[in-house]
Structure formats: C-alpha cells, structure tokens
Image: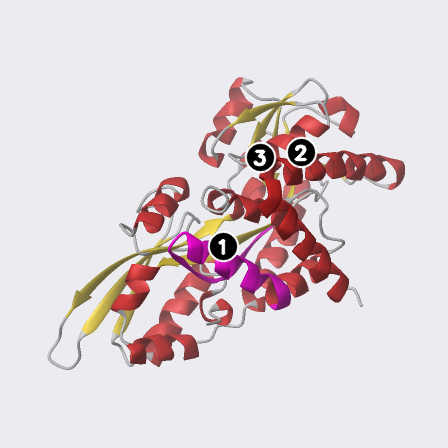
Amino acid sequence: MNWKAVLCGAAVAVALGSGTSAAVAETKLKYATSAPVKTPWVAHANQVAAAVQEATGGSVKIDVFPGSQLGNEQDVIRQVARGRVQMGAFSNTAASLIVPEISLLAAPYIWDNVAQADCALDNHMDAVFQDRFKEMDLVFLGWTEVGQMGYASAKPIESLTELSGKKVRVAPSKTSSLTAESVGANSVMLPITEVASALQTGLVDSADLPGLAFTSLGIGKIAPHWIATNHSHQVGVVLMSRKVWSKLTPEEQTQMQAARVDPTILRKQVRGAEKMMFGKFEEAGGRIVHPEGEELDRWKQAGEQARLALVKELGDKGAAVYEQIQQAKRACSS
C-alpha cells in the first residue's frame, strides 16, 4: 500500500478520536507538528487536511496543531510506536530512534544531488522502510522534506580545519555526531530548541542544523556565520500506528488513499523558502561560506569516513540498507 502521495510532506503527529453528528459519523484526527506556524510544513499539513476531508465526505476531519503542541517529536514517535499516539510526521533524527538504519538516508554526502535523492526515495526506498517500520508495528505513509544541513557559528569559521577542537552542537543522532567528529570537533548533543541559548552562552561554538531551521528560528541573529556544506540531505517520514489504521473503515482507507497531494509541492516550498531566507540572512549582514574545490573535497573525505563508520555501527541491517541505497543511486543516475 503506497501512501507517499497521500500524506507526504505533512509534518504532523496525530491523535485519533471519533464523534457523531446528525448527518454522518465523524472520525477526528489531531495532527501535531513541531513546525512553527507560517512555515511550508504547516501549510502542507493544512492542504492534506482539506484533501482528506473532501475525499471522505467529511467522515474524517483533521485538525492541525503546529509548534509541538502535543509534544516533541522524540517523545511522540515513541508513543506512536506503542500505539498511545496514533500518527505523526518525524524527522530522520526521530525516526532513527525506532529504525536506526534510516539514519543512512542522511549520511554525509551519500547523494550526488537532490534530484538523485528524490528519485531514490520516491521510486526505490519506500519498500525498504515500509518493511522495517512494519516490524515495529508502524505503517510507513510517506516522505517529508527538511532540507540541506550546514554549520552555524557565532564567530567566523572559514574551513573544515577551523572546526577541529571546537564544541559543535549535534542532533540526537549518530549521523550528526559522527560527521562532526570526523572533522575533529567535540560533539555536544542538544535538541534544536536549545541551540540558540547554547550558542549565545558559549556552551557550543557551532551547530549542525538544517538551513531553513537556522534562518526561520532566528538563530542567524546569534550566529551570523554559516558554512553551506550541504553535507546532509534531511528528509522525514509520516508514520501511523497499525492499530489506528485498522480503526478506519475500508471505505475511509480507500478514500484517504485517493486524497492526493503532490509530493513535490513540499520539496519546492522548502527549497524555495530556504533560498529566500538565506537571501534575507545575507541582506541583514549574515555571512555564508560555500566550500569549493579542495576545501569541498576535504569535507567529502571526512563525510565518507563518517558514513563508513555509521554503516559499521549499524551492523548487518545497516550494510544491507546501504547496499540498497547504492542500487537506488545507480538506477537514478542512468
């Protein structure tokens, strides 16, 4: 069952309830997303809510709760896995808490370009992770887009070597910490909500972040220097508890599958917003460094070191998924 075009891009977490009216029985779905209001992720979630309500004739109604109103994604994804919260959209970081091998999709420089990544995800990687999440009693519904990663810093950092010995904020994932450590940095694991204060107080010197999160959360005002390494292409996933899916009627399941929102919409929105926000960042006095030539080669060499270390740490399952990614890359490069 392929849901990727149904709910792809809805950066959401869901709680299921039901109600009745004189006209039709109504199933109410709460979509909670960690994304702030007025972001592409919330806009896309609202588009999905409207499409589902129309397709089901109002028997399924979705209310979107932005800004982590129903909890942070690390907590919510565990609740979904237990069946206590019914549904959600999660970053690669959060998803890797349940299925560690998905962290390989964000491994440094694993993709040659975003077009290759899009092709691989849409045409080859669905089945791989449908099976893995099914083992965890979760239904994989589709991909979301987060964007490219780089490094923010309060003081100028021109090159990879200048990060050596620095305290770098990393996300709660092996991918982020191994990447920072491959350039000689000292990793400090922090949730994204604590990044601004950590940079402001000097707890960290730099931070590994998605570009759009860096600009939209105002972190650029505290850390006006950005290294556009684009070392990791961050995607997310939409997941549902299998128990929740089974509570929907067969007709509702079919109708929801028909409620299609083009999966390329969120990608275009995120990438367009990222470009626009970085333009505003520079206009406000922010500085962006674009690694090129030999400097970019050094970043990629460090990334390969981190990537191979990640595969080794993930064991046999990680090695199998890594090979499937290589096959998808070849198919999407021909």
- Rendered location of residue 10, percent (x, y): 45, 60
Please tell me whether mark 2 sits on a helix, a strand or a loop.
helix
- Rendered location of residue 188, percent (x, y): 55, 24
Do we see residue 38 in this rendering?
Answer: no
Residue 18 falls left or right of residue 63: left
Q: Tell me, yes or no, whether the two marked residues, 3 and 1, touch with CB atoms within 8 Å.
A: no
Q: What kind of residue is marked 3?
A: Lys
- Rendered location of residue 56, percent (x, y): 31, 79
Is residue 160 depicted above or below 10 in this figure? above
The quarter of the displayed image where residue 28 is located:
bottom left
Q: What kind of residue is marked 1?
A: Arg
Tell me how the rendering is colored: secondary structure
User: How far apart, in angstroms, are the residues tagged by discs 3 and 1?
Assistant: 19 Å
Question: Few, some or many C-alpha atoms within 10 Å of disc 3 (few <14, some 14-19, many ≥20)?
Answer: many
Q: Which sits earlier in the primary sequence, circle 2 or circle 1?
A: 1
Q: Which mark, residue 179?
A: 2
Q: What kind of residue is marked 2?
A: Thr
- Callout in the foreground (2, 1): 1
- Rendered location of residue 46, percent (x, y): 40, 64
Q: Who's the residue at 50% across and 67% down the image?
A: 4
Q: Who's the residue at 56% across and 46% down the image?
A: 101
Is residue 258 depicted above or below 40 in this figure? below
Q: Which residues are magenta?
A: 123-148
Q: Which sits earlier in the primary sequence, circle 2 or circle 3?
A: 3
How many marks do you count on the picture?
3
Q: Which residue is mark 3?
A: 174
87 or 53, which is in the foreground?
Answer: 87
The quarter of the displayed image where residue 30 is located:
bottom left
Residue 230 falls left or right of residue 192: right
Q: Which mark, residue 132?
A: 1
